[in-house]
Image: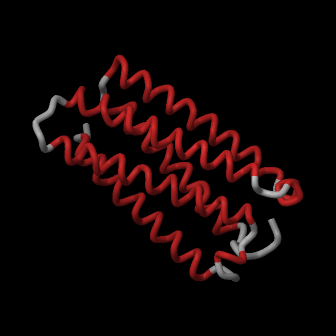
Amino acid sequence: MIAPGEALGIAVQVTITLAGFTGVVAVFGTNPVHEWSRLNRLRLRLLLTMSSIPVALCLIPLVLLTTGIRQTVIWRAVSVAAVFAFLAAAVMAQRAMTRVPASELSRAERSTAIFYTTAAVGAASIVLLVYNAILLGAFWPFFTAVVVSMLAALLQFVRLVFLRPGGTAE
């Protein structure tokens, strides 16, 4: 069994690496980021958001684990923080998605399906976080939500790489 501190440290390393690779994609894309389509800029924003949130959510409990606070209290507290972080990200993503022109979405019909499927999985992880904050106070539901966020970021990274950011073809 892996210790929570070790799992959190690994998650931080993975998400920071993913964010670094994102920078490489942005720099070596065919056009500067400000010339990318709205949909590709949304993908980049989602990727960076879903990479940044896990870093913060992993670092906070790492600090709290050094204080001597009971672990159930830590996992409940960071689960509440995660709920607020993910809800804020979801609101931001939904608003940004509505600003993508319909013509651009129609050329990339899978984007809408992937967006809403990812949102549904994210909503399930938020429900799990609420359950953890109220009843469980365990590490695994919190870490599950962190991993879900990391997987969402990875999905956006793969899509950005394969869909050639800066290009007009979807």
Q: Position of residue 151 (x, y in %)?
A: 52, 49
- Residue sitting at x 13%, y 44%: 66
From the viewer's side, name the closer residue of 142 and 56: 56
Quadrant assignment, res 107: bottom right
Taking the view exactly as shown, the residue that stands out farthest to the top is 135
Place of residue 133 in the rendered image (x, y in percent of width and height, measured from the top left): 36, 25
Residue at 60% of width from left, 43% of height from top? 91
Q: Where is residue 139 shown, x and y percent of the image?
A: 31, 32
Q: Quadrant of residue 122?
A: top right
Q: Is residue 154 left or right of residue 7?
A: right
What residue is shown at x 71% (from left), y 73% (from top)?
Answer: 36
Left or right, 85 with respect to 63, comes to right
- Above or below — where is 78 with respect to 50? above
Tally of marks? 0
Point 39% across, 59% down: residue: 14
Q: Quadrant of the C terminus?
A: bottom right
